């Protein structure tokens, strides 16, 4: 690689960094503005918007509601996605391609179309809008990502591991629980965090299938309709910090488990 090429790649890289991080930094900074309106210049600073997030019972309730939905939908996604991945891994049977295609399909359908379809199907099944409907839609949308991540991890599992467990007398369930599942834990943790963040951030399906209790993205959308304010920036910043902490924890946990399985 020539020096000119390295310089060009460095410029592209730092331009991308600026493009991604400058809006985030501005969002955080605007949450400290001592005014009801967003914009420059910032003449005085305050922590009131951030302290208000933790003292507002409505916002805290919405945070909790969104977390419960994210955890529940992730649990369902992990169970179903892992089961499908194990079913498809290394097996040749009629209809395998169809099952795989149908599993991946929810990730390919545009969000607005998916939300409308879920709404129609929920009405057909008699499912009322609310928490259960949102969990159901989020889980279906997240299953493809779990399946893809777990299949990728399964493809690196040496067959000799499970064969050795079977030779020592373990039945298929014990071999899966004692050998395959521990090996899959880095992928499961990574997929879990990804599904948590997808569910926590999902607006379209939550909007179409929600009832009177909004999730966090729906609450932010409702507040935006009355105009931008530092309060919205503060709420978004708290959510950003939570997701960043989860991402760092998942990355470190995955790295540690990979070293243990190496």
Image (cartoon, rainbow, N blue to C red):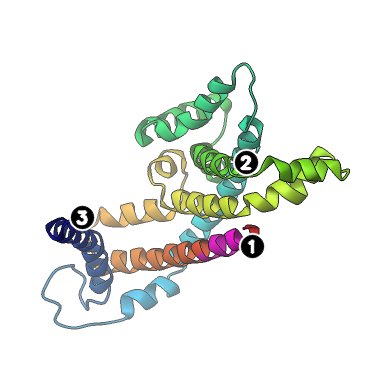
Alpha carbons under labels 3 and 2: distance apart? 42 Å
Report the residue at 66% width, 51% height from top: 183
Is 99 one of the magenta-colored residues?
A: no
Q: Nearer the viewer, residue 246 or 215?
A: 246
Q: Position of residue 219 (x, y in %)?
A: 38, 55
The answer to which of marks 2 and 1 sits earlier in the sequence is 2
Circle 2: is it few (<14), some (14-19), or many (20+) Cα within 10 Å? many
Residue bearing mark 3: 1
- The secondary structure type at the circle numbered 3 is loop
- Res 160 visible: yes
Highlighted range, magenta = 252-259
Please say whether residue 136 is visible from this viewpoint. Answer: no
Mark 2 secondary-structure assignment: helix
| Image quarter in which the N terminus is found | bottom left
Q: Residue at x 38, y 64 (%)?
A: 240
Left of 112 or right of it: where is 179?
A: right
Examine the rendered structure and indicate whether residue 205 appears above or below residue 10: above
Q: Residue furthest right?
A: 169
Q: Which mark is residue 260?
A: 1
Of the two numbered discs 3 and 2 on the same chain, state the one appearing first in sequence. 3
Residue with the most extreme front position: 2
Dividing the image into 4 quarters, which one contains the C terminus?
Answer: bottom right
User: Could you tell which of marks 3 and 1 lies nearer the N-terminus?
Assistant: 3
| Residue position marked by numbered label 2 in the rendering | 82
Characterize the local packing of mark 3: few (<14), some (14-19) or many (20 or more) Cα atoms within 10 angstroms.
few
Q: Between 246 and 3, which is closer to the camera in this rendering?
A: 3
- Magenta highlight: main SS: helix
- x and y percentages locating residue 222 in the rendered image: 32, 53
The residue depicted at 23 percent of the width and 82 percent of the height is 45
């Amino acid at each position: 690689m020539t020096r000119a090429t390295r310089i060009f790649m460095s410029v592209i890289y730092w331009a991308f960094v600026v493009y991604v991080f400058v809006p985030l930094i501005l969002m955080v900074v605007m949450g400290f503005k001592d005014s009801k309106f967003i914009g420059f210049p910032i003449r005085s600073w305050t922590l009131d918007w951030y302290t208000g997030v933790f003292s507002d019972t409505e916002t805290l309730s919405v945070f909790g509601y969104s977390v419960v939905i994210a955890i529940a939908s992730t649990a369902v996604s992990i169970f179903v996605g892992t089961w499908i991945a194990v079913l498809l891994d290394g097996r040749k049977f009629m209809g395998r391609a169809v099952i795989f295609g149908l599993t991946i399909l929810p990730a390919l359908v545009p969000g607005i179309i998916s939300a409308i379809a879920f709404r129609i199907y929920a009405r057909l099944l008699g499912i009322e809008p609310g928490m259960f409907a949102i969990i159901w839609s989020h889980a279906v949308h997240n299953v493809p990502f779990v399946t893809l991540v777990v299949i990728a991890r399964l493809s690196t599992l040496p067959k000799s591991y499970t064969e050795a467990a079977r030779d020592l007398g373990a039945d298929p369930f014990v071999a899966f629980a004692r050998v395959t599942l521990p090996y899959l834990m880095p992928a499961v943790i990574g997929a879990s965090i990804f599904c948590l963040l997808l569910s926590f951030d999902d607006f379209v399906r939550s909007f179409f299938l929600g009832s009177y209790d909004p999730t966090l993205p729906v609450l932010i959308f409702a507040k935006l309709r009355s105009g931008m304010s530092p309060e919205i920036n503060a709420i978004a910043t708290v959510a950003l910090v939570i997701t960043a902490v989860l991402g760092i924890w998942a990355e470190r946990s995955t790295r540690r488990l990979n070293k243990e399985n190496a």
